[in-house]
Image (tube, grey):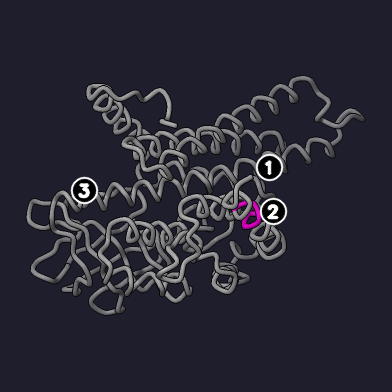
Amino acid sequence: MDDLSADLAALGESIADVLTSESESRKVHAFIDGKNDLDAAIWRQATELGWLAVGLPEDVGGLGMGVQGLAVLHRELGRRVTPGAFISTLSAAQTLVDCADKSVQEKYLPLVASGKLSIGIPSASLQAGPGSLAVSGSKVSGKMTEVLSVANAGLVLVPVKNGAAEAWALIEIDGKAARLTAHTLWDQTRSFCTLECTGAAVAHLVADAKQAAAWRARLGVHQSLAVIADSMGGAESILALTLDYMKQRVQFERPIASFQALKHRAARLKIESELARHVAAQALQSVAANDADCAAWASMSKVTVSDAYCLIAADCVQLHGGVGHTWEFDCHIYLKRSRLNQSMVENNAQQLDRVAGAFAAATSEGRSVLELPI
């Protein structure tokens, strides 16, 4: 095991130890019922323990573990269906690492590393649609209804219309010209907001079409990797919980885990989990190596892993029997999170269309898309 692998293993163990007690099932249920502030409590813990600095370069206060470190963090958060603005903030931060100039990085990334700044990003589309945000000069006006963000975020990274061209903007939230209003979805472990701008000042504008496309691509990659890791952790966790339940649940004086039909169902879910794990590892390897087709690998892996998570979570509800549908069991929390993961970044049908086009282009250029370069 090399030094990075050892560090990543130690990181995963330390995060798991904290979340086992701080984000255990009863606290998550209480958070959903509005009885605690688990999201804020975990964010404070993450700040104190350096989790928010994991992927950032050392020169801005980070730990320098890159996308591998972030995958470990998101996977453990997914295991415990932990709430918080982790996917949006850390995906945006890594996009700044990849695309922003030094002055922008030095302004915002130390604030992310220290937990003082959370960032909102688009949740389901990385392009500005009709009637969306538009920039005129140095001001932005309009509305975006699906922003993955907490209401007290200090910054958003969003697509804006710049005439007929694509552009991306960093907008500081002041509560006046730029406002975030929270709204509730079926997955209450995640926070979504509507962004409204009325002549809000642009903190940083990416107006060049080529650069804007690069920002969109990198945000898509990092958000996809976060969803992949979250989905992988969630799928493994709910499957393990369900197998334990099957060993304890007795019918006809026998544990239901001994029934042949249920053994086959459990085996199928384990196979789906293992296949998803390998696909996730391949996407992470591709992005870490920054190979030419890493965006396509990230998109394809996001589809495969989030679909597997949803399949596993849905069947785990059934394997719990009728009680799996009830509010006090964990199954429905994982199922709701898996459903939302399918629609994040872009919905999976859109992702597959884009992957097909990317792989067709790679083939026409003479590159193999059957395996990753070593």
Q: Residue at x 39, y 35 (%)?
A: 297
Residue sitting at the far right: 253
Considering the numbered disc 1 on the image, is that residue within a helix, a strand or a loop? helix
* 207 is within the stretch colored magenta: no
Considering the numbered disc 2 on the image, is that residue within a helix, a strand or a loop? loop
Q: Main secondary structure of the magenta part?
A: helix
**Residue type for callout 1:** Gly
Circle 1 is placed at which residue position? 324
Position of residue 199 measured from the top left corner of the image (x, y, whole percent)? 16, 73
Is residue 34 placed above or below 329 in the rendered structure?
Answer: below
Instruction: Report whether 137 appears left or right of 110.
Output: left
Instruction: Report whether 245 appears left or right of 173.
Output: right
Circle 3 is placed at which residue position? 213
- The answer to whether residue 255 shows anywhere in this view is yes
The residue range painted magenta reads 8-12
Q: Residues within 10 Å of mark 1 (few under 14, many from 20)?
A: some
Position of residue 77 measured from the top left corner of the image (x, y, whole percent)? 58, 55
